[in-house]
Image: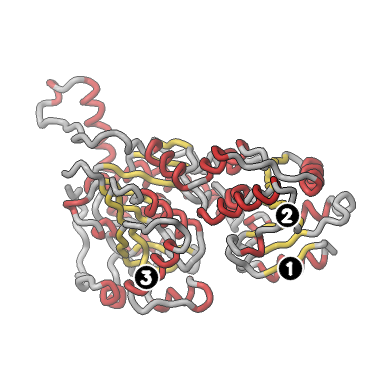
Amino acid sequence: MSTRRHLAVFTTASLPWMTGTAINPLFRAAYLAKDGDREVTLVIPWLSLRDQELVYPNKIVFGSPLELEAYVRRWIEERISFRPSFSIKFYPAKFSKELRSILPVGDITECIPDEVADVAVLEEPEHLNWYHHGRKWKNKFRRVIGVVHTNYIAYVKREKNGQAIACFMKYMNTWVTRIYCHKIIRLSGATQDLPRSVVCNVHGVNPKFLEVGKLKLKQLRNGEIAFTKGAYYIGKMVWSKGYRELLDLLSKYQSKLVGLEVDLYGSGEDSDEVRKSAELLGLAVKVHPGRDHADPLFHDYKVFINPSTTDVVCTTTAEALAMGKIVICANHPSNEFFKQFPNCRTYDSGEEFVQLTLDALAEQPAPLTDMQSHDLSWEAATERFMEAAELNLPISAEPRIHQTSKASLPAFMRTRKLKQSLEDASVYLHQALSGLEVTRRAFGAVPKTLQPDEQLCNDLGLAPAKKKRLKLKLMT
């Protein structure tokens, strides 16, 4: 194999769905390929027209993968200062209304030819593997790195029978990440602990936000008024994203926060309920439709309030800090990375929230140093990713266990061989369960997704799926 590494970045969403798992892997692919030392392929889901209408905003749809690729490339090129050199491939997928998620169809490892299969980066490895039926990732790729984006446990606990579902999901996540990944990177301690995992924030911010921060710093140094607006929050408008906590705080301490007006920006299933609740509580809160955080509308706000505790690492918090704003957020593991920045103020109680908010409105933000700006950038995030994933080491052949008698093997190799046998058995069990339609349906998979249907095959130029079970033996 060439000494030039090939990284295939698989993710669970694609633009124009403005979700973290569509945006952050796109930036990761661009910056991994930036210096030209690595070949990078971004592998994203392709949805049928019907599913696109359910997922993508503003009635945006694409007639072919080429159209979607052009959209994705245009979007990233407008936000970075270099021409990205990664390639894009698509895997067949379906949208699950029940899970509000895009799920892979068939064996998505087939997107990468065997001859270039080196490193697989699985953005949301648990999500990609709940129903995986096909090639074992660790057999096909030299290294498999999982990046955990979502605190699924926190979300399901809010649902009916949430504790029981969370217990099962915790076990399932541990199972599939153990058998399919060599290393797991958790963006923060807000995620569940997983085998062979490290905690490291490997995300950065769109460079446009850092440019705004530099402009605001220049205005402050020139004695100009850099911030003419007060406080705001932006995020998907669902109660679990911190809106309930924020309205509760504003309502409880209304008498102490006299004169405070908060603007909320977001779109989502709970938009109408959030608006009605704010009106019923008599709060000085204005609810607006969702907008891109890079919109100039947000540049002049001074204080970003984010009480959410379901995020793993909140992208909008990083963006607000990059723009030179003061951030008020909960003292929670998801915000640990941000505590290094002077403009990040964390609270443990409602009283602290009140005091920090009043102080922030009365003060000017601390200037963002060059080092702090770098720490928020995708350049720094890429450096952290390479180190956490242990990909800075030179390529070397994986150690092999020679075929010999157990008695002649050293003790540590016998232990390793036993562990490998147990893992192989665990993979076989997962493949057996994920290969049965009745089992897949019982655990929430979209019906008939063992193989792509005719429409997906036509869209992606795939050979028609043969109606036969995949062999359950381990493939090498």
Q: Nearer the viewer, residue 376 or 273?
A: 376
CB contact under 8 Å: marks 3 and 2: no
From the image, tell me which residue sits under label 3.
Answer: 70
Whether residue 350 is visible? no
Residue 258 lies in quadrant = bottom right
Circle 1 or circle 2, nearest the eye: 2
- Name the residue rendered at 26%, 48% in the picture: 6
The answer for how far apart the CA atoms under marks 1 and 2 are is: 26 Å
Give percent across and percent down for residue 69: 36, 68
SS at circle 1? helix
From the image, tell me which residue sits under label 1.
Answer: 275
From the image, tell me which residue sits under label 2.
Answer: 227
- Name the residue rendered at 69%, 41% in the picture: 366
The answer for how far apart the CA atoms under marks 3 and 1 are is: 37 Å
Name the colouring of the figure.
secondary structure
SS at circle 3? helix
Give percent across and percent down for residue 456: 30, 73
CB contact under 8 Å: marks 1 and 2: no
Give percent across and percent down for residue 280: 82, 66
SS at circle 2? loop
Q: Nearer the viewer, residue 386 or 404?
A: 386
